[in-house]
Amino acid sequence: MNPTSSSKDLYLEEILDGNYLDSIANPREFLGFEIGERVATPEQITEAINQWATQSNRMKVVQYGQTHEGRPLVAVFISSPENINRCQKYQDNLNKLADAKKYK
């Protein structure tokens, strides 16, 4: 499947300007094509997410289930390293707030 011509316009270099870390792999390195040239498969997207998570301390990936075809469903959290390290604390606080009987 090929993206529509208008979707390729979304990936113009002028739009994707910014400060990029050399330690984070460019998608073409593991996809084998430039973003916007083709549609990535779910497996390729999952691989990209997992590679980026190992390359950055600003990203955490949590698998929370599977599709009916057995593909992983993941939540991706992107934040400062400090916030990523506090994820469990935030989850614990949310769990406490979810029990209304504990709070009046």
Image (tube, rainbow, N blue to C red):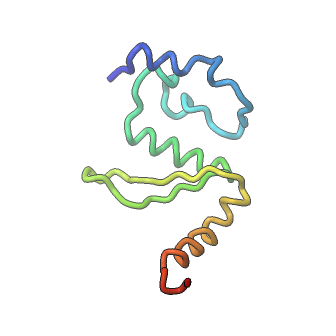
Residue at the far top: name it: 5
Q: Is residue 58 left or right of residue 76?
A: right
Count numbered badges in the picture: 0
In this rendering, is residue 72 above or below 52? below
Q: Quadrant of the N terminus?
A: top left
Q: Nearer the viewer, residue 98 or 10?
A: 98
Kindly identify the residue that appears in the image at 68 percent across and 64 percent down. Answer: 85
The answer to which image quadrant residue 43 occupies is: top left
Residue 62 placement (x, y as % from top left): 50, 59
In this rendering, is residue 60 above or below 55? below
Q: Is residue 14 left or right of residue 5?
A: right
Kindly identify the residue that appears in the image at 54 percent across and 21 percent down. Answer: 11
Residue 32 placement (x, y as % from top left): 49, 27
Residue 103 placement (x, y as % from top left): 55, 83
Q: Nearer the viewer, residue 56 or 95?
A: 95
The answer to which image quadrant residue 40 occupies is: top left
Q: Is residue 24 left or right of residue 42?
A: right
Q: Quadrant of the C terminus?
A: bottom right
Residue at the far front: name it: 104
Kindly identify the residue that appears in the image at 53 percent across and 86 percent down. Answer: 102
Residue 52 placement (x, y as % from top left): 59, 45
Q: Nearer the viewer, residue 92 or 63?
A: 92
Q: Nearer the viewer, residue 95 or 81?
A: 95
Kindly identify the residue that appears in the image at 45 percent across and 20 percent down. Answer: 7
In this rendering, is residue 54 above or below 11? below
The answer to which image quadrant residue 29 occupies is: top right
Q: Is residue 47 left or right of residue 86?
A: left
